[in-house]
């Protein structure tokens, strides 16, 4: 069986490269398909970490490849230009390997804006997509999850961006999850057609004519109701909402302190809200498979992210319209 080739930015996470590499090795053990991983970062750092794991982990130089990236991204870099002037940084090298056809997918826990910029300019965007978006799955009280996008790639959005997110989300759920006619809604402060900003009202009018599954506006109290398969909003709103939902586990432990059995029951029912379990979210609308992991990803989250990326690559034939 041919391995799935993946590129990983080892410098993106908050907890250091060792945690990222530990996650990579864990993913290789758990994957049902062989993985060939290109570790992009400072060579000495990668080599040192690999040597420390060599006694307990089973891997070879053929399935773990070190890609030396001596440059670093400064705090004052312009995200849209980093891919041009810092080609030997770990985050840019991941996307370059994908453009060159060396790998089939990339993963980074680094700066979302830089990842978006590099992916957009090096890989290109899908047809009829004005702006790629980050999507995240949220649990609902119905039988299936809802896709929320954007969740951080585009903090400010124009009407055409929201329309693109709606169409992209519709196709993603339809093809990737085999839902015949996914319902799409715009997140708004009310359900009445006159409410909301001009951008949202205009997006609703256009989606009503272009998206078969468009169902209208949805308010925040119905995000987890299961009333919509896809919920569209700008990246600022989506990121705040996603992180608020992720705090559920912390709130649960605080409120139910001392009731361990009940805590575990609730957490088990809401596992999709734990970032460690879904690992990363996809950048939709690109000509390639790119995943953005949480900055505070543990090794478990990195491992899960890689497994998700590998599954996506395997299923890409079924969702070609979403990625290309």
Image (cartoon, rainbow, N blue to C red):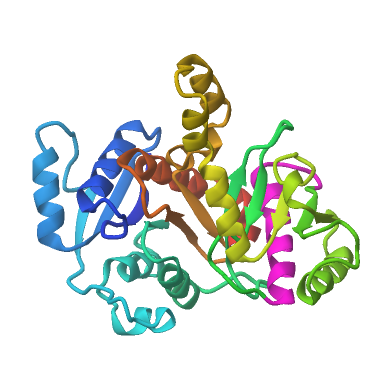
In the picture, the quarter occupied by the N terminus is: top left
Depth order, front residue of 281/256: 256
153 vs 19, left or right, is right
Q: Give the extent of the magenta segment.
A: 158-181
Is any part of residue 222 visible from this angle?
yes
Up/down of 203 relative to 50, above or below: below
What residue is shown at x 42% (from left), y 53% (from top)? 293
Instruction: Name the spot of residue 182 as percent of width and height, x first.
Output: 78, 48
Depth order, front residue of 66/278: 278
Chief SS of the magenta region: helix
Instruction: Name the spot of residue 188 as percent of width and height, x first.
Output: 77, 60
Res 217 quadrant in image: bottom right
- Residue 94 colored in magenta in the image: no
What residue is shown at x 78% (from left), y 72% (from top)? 197
Up/down of 29 relative to 177, above or below: above
Depth order, front residue of 78/37: 78
In the picture, the quarter occupied by the C terminus is: bottom right
Instruction: Name the spot of residue 222 as percent of width and height, x first.
Output: 76, 45
Up/down of 319 relative to 272, above or below: below
- Residue 164 colored in magenta in the image: yes
Depth order, front residue of 167/230: 230
Res 273 quadrant in image: top right
Instruction: Name the spot of residue 95 as percent of width and height, x first.
Output: 38, 67
What residue is shown at x 47% (from left), y 29% (from top)? 253
Is any part of residue 63 visible from this angle?
no
Res 135 quadrant in image: bottom right
């Amino acid at each position: 069986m041919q391995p799935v080739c993946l590129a990983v930015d080892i410098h993106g996470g908050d907890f250091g490269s060792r945690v990222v590499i530990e996650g990579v090795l864990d993913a290789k053990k758990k994957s049902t398909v062989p993985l060939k991983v290109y570790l992009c970062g400072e060579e000495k750092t990668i080599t040192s970490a690999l040597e420390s794991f060599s006694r307990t982990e089973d891997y070879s130089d053929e399935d773990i490849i070190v890609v030396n990236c001596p440059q670093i991204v400064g705090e004052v870099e312009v995200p849209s230009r980093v891919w041009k002037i810092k080609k030997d940084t770990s985050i840019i090298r991941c996307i370059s390997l994908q453009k060159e056809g060396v790998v089939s997918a990339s993963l980074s826990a680094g700066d979302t804006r830089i990842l978006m910029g590099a992916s957009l300019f090096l890989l290109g965007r899908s047809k009829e997509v004005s702006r790629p978006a980050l999507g995240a799955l949220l649990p609902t009280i119905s039988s299936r999850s809802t896709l929320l996008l954007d969740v951080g790639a585009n903090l400010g959005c124009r009407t055409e961006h929201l329309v693109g997110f709606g169409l992209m989300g519709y196709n993603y759920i339809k093809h990737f999850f085999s839902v015949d006619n996914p319902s799409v809604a715009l997140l708004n402060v009310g359900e009445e057609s006159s409410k909301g900003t001009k951008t949202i009202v205009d997006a609703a009018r256009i989606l009503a004519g272009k998206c078969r599954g468009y169902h209208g506006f949805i308010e925040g109290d119905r995000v987890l109701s299961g009333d919509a398969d896809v919920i569209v909003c700008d990246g600022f709103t989506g990121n705040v909402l996603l992180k608020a939902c992720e705090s559920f586990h912390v709130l649960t432990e605080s409120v139910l302190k001392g009731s361990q059995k009940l805590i575990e029951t609730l957490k088990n029912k809401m596992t999709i809200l734990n970032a460690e379990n879904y690992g990363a979210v996809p950048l939709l609308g690109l000509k390639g498979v790119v995943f953005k992991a949480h900055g505070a990803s543990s090794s478990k989250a990195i491992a899960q992210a890689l497994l998700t990326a590998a599954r996506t690559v395997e299923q890409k034939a079924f969702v070609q319209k979403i990625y290309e």
